[in-house]
Amino acid sequence: MYLTKEEEKMLDGEMGVAAEAAMKILVALGDACEAKRLIPVSSVHISGGTYYALGDEGIEWLDGLVKGGAKCKVPTTRNPGMVDHEQWKEMGLTELLKENQGKIDNLYKRIGVIPINSCLPYLLGNIPLCGAHFAWGGSSGQVFANSVLGARGNREGGPANIAASIIGKTPEYGLHLTENRYGEILVKVEADAKKFDVTDYAILGYFVGRQVVEKIPVFTGLPKYLSLEQLRAIAYSLPVGGAVPMFHIVGVTPEAKDLNTAFGGKKPDEKITVTSEELKQTKEKLSSVGRKKPDLVCFGCPHCTYKEIKDIALMLKGKRIDSEIRLWVCTAKQIKEIMRRWGLLDIIEKAGGLVISDVCASVGAPFKFVEGVKVIATNSVKTAFYAPGTSGVDVIFAETNECINAAITGRWEG
Amino acid sequence: METLIIRCKRVVKGKGCGEALVSREPISFVGSIDKDSGVIVERGHELEGESIVGKVLVFPHGKGSTAGSYIIYSLAKRKKAPAAIINIKAEPIIITGAAMAGIPLVHKLEKNPTKVIRTGDYVIVDAYNEIVQVKKKIP
């Protein structure tokens, strides 16, 4: 990879320890991926905000960067952590976890990261527009920004995001280049998508992710108008099933006005179909345990949108959650405050639920730190996939309304 | 003992050797590997229950959550990391994690490593000279 004189100085450590560490990561990435040069980015979002992901070693690494003079050069936001500092007691978390997460939260603030503590940068003011280059971690946001917004960035790890923010640049390879953004596999949805709700879109994404692994799928057979939540469901679940970097939906997403454009004038490498039977089987496999009474019902992976919280609040209105069951609705601080103003927070809290901000609900979710939580129920494909491995809990995967009914009655219907 | 010499491309410098642990499935370091023991815990994964500690870990590429780089770094700090990693084609999560942790990482071998290397073979990864040596396990 070509480096400018200034970039070479940074790599050689002439401009501080932080710049050197950042350049080492960017150069390894650039060389391995055969990038010709570094290009400026307009937006950075950092994944790996949790104590689970960083651990004490990650904190040391971040602390070293701060001491080495690290500062964000471009607008930079970050993913959530494990602790809502205003409600950690109600969540049943320990003071030790609160302290460790607090260290990470402070270190990020010291390097100049905007503390949105959420996986929804594109709803919270960090929005790379069509054609802009970005460096984001967090697979769901990265796939969303490429596919739905038409901005350009690769799926990179949290440290690579921090490196990009410190230098203000990223290696030019992969999805930064037009020729790598075309579709590769045609996905014909034969199941009746008009009947799909948001969860079905997530199951579809997960199923297709497993099939295409790391290639770019092009969907046909989906409705022309898809909601934010439906598009996001596909975006977040594709990289749970595989390592899918982006997707196209013919007639919907910005780089797929028709089939030919989506494939860049080439023929698909492969065609696959998706039937309702396959989606049904996929859904069943996402639960790790039979339908029994959950200890915790968790929504908000990715973080809940306004509409999702409103829907949950309306389902809980005037109801009371079973006294042995916890109900968490995870979202961003900003969205939570708007919900409070709207009166919906009150409804959820009166029913016995908690609206939690700054907390991740899948990778690094603090489930295992809450006493007595062995079985969780969720409407999220990502929580269902990750929680057994990261938190050692069993998961029941179900629709939002089924989860809420179970939270109220302690039983599953049907 | 039969020995294979395979050329490769360097991603992260270094030299590492050990028994091979081969997966034909991609690996997500988040949720798939227990940081304290270095054992693969992803349910249904072909390597479920296997330890990666000190092994030459061979798999097609990474997958899943981008927090994986920190997991690789933590595994190294806890001395639970593989001795070296061989990918068919390395992707950013594994590259970044290996660069932070200083784990030798190579990819783009002349032959598909998940086919020519078997679990239990003794493998030397020389990322400086871009060479992988495989001493086949006696059946």
Image: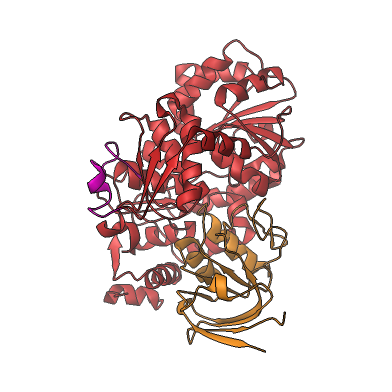
Please give the name of the residue rendered at 57% of the width and 39% of the height, measured from the top-left corner.
A282
Of A362 and A103, nearer the camera is A362
State which quarter of the image contains the C terminus of chain B. bottom right
In the image, residue A274 lies at what x, y percent? 45, 39
**Nearest the eye: A149 or A248:** A248
Q: How is the image coloured?
A: by chain
Task: Based on the picture, tell me whether residue A229 belongs to the magenta stretch.
Answer: no
Q: Position of residue A211 (x, y in %)?
A: 48, 49
Residue A228 lies left or right of residue A242; in this view the side is: left
Taking depth in this image into account, of A23 and A37 the one nearest to the observer is A37
Magenta-drawn stretch, dominant element (helix, strand or loop): loop
Question: What residue do we see at 27% from left, 74% from top?
Answer: A4
Q: Position of residue A330 (x, y in %)?
A: 55, 33
Judge whether B51 appears above or below A209 on screen: below
Depicted A292 relative to depicted A1: above or below: above
Q: Is residue A350 left or right of residue A159?
A: right
Q: Is residue B37 above or below residue A365?
A: below
Which stretch is magenta?
Answer: A248-267
Q: Write down which chain is painted orange.
A: B
Q: Extreme top residue here?
A: A318
Report whether residue A367 is seen.
yes
Q: Residue at x 26, y 59 (%)?
A: A179
Chain letter for the part of the structure drawn in red: A
Q: Is A261 displayed left or right of A315 in the figure?
A: left
Picture coordinates of residue A6, whole percent (x, y)? 29, 73
**Count of numbered circles on the image:** 0
